[in-house]
Image (tube, rainbow, N blue to C red):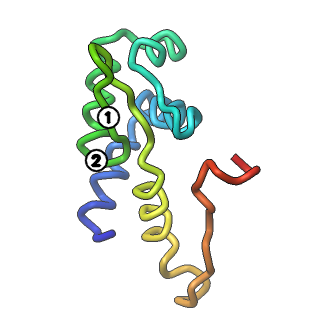
Amino acid sequence: MDEDVAVKALAALAQSSRLKVFRAIVGTGPEGIQPGQLSLALDIPANTLSFHLKELHHAALVSVQREGRFLRYRADLAAMQSLMDFLTAHCCQGVPCGDPLNLTCESDSC
């Protein structure tokens, strides 16, 4: 991940409501969630949620898939892992610290 992409992702997450939205989407795992369900779960008006989802999608932190009349949002775990790798690339006095996270929902830890 280059610095510009990391800055865009971090900027998208630097707003409290948007961070809550992203964390809620991450919590749904590979199934993802439809905006209506997310709006109800987080008590965020649909138009406000739409803005936050657009920003997260623009920052490549979530993917969106059309399902008939509905949309389904999923966290891009690879992008999240890339961001974590970028942030921890120079930890431990420049020595790679190994895999800081195992961001798959296939393990028992998710």
Whether residue 67 sits left or right of residue 38 in the image: it is left
* Residue in the foreground of this view, choosing between 47 and 34: 34
Residue 109: % across, % down:
74, 51
Q: Earlier in the sequence, mark 2 or mark 1?
A: 2
Question: What residue type is disc 2 on?
Answer: Ala
Q: Secondary structure at mark 2?
A: loop
Residue 31: % across, % down:
52, 33
Q: Residue at x 28, y 47 (%)?
A: 59
Q: Residue at x 58, y 56 (%)?
A: 103
Q: Which residue is mark 2?
A: 59
Residue 2: % across, % down:
28, 71
* Residue in the foreground of this view, choosing between 33 and 17: 33
Q: Secondary structure at mark 1?
A: strand
* Residue in the foreground of this view, choosing between 2 and 106: 106
Question: What residue type is disc 1 on?
Answer: Val
As drawn, the label of residue 64 is: 1
Question: Disc 2 to disc 1, how far (Cα)?
Answer: 12 Å
> Which quarter of the figure has residue 92?
bottom right
Q: Residue at x 40, y 43 (%)?
A: 13
Q: Please, is residue 85 above or below residue 63 in the view?
A: below
Number of residues whose C-alpha sits closer than 10 Å to that of mark 1, classed few (under 14), some (14–19) or many (20 or more): some
Q: Please, is residue 58 above or below residue 106 in the view?
A: above
Whether residue 51 sits left or right of residue 103 in the image: it is left
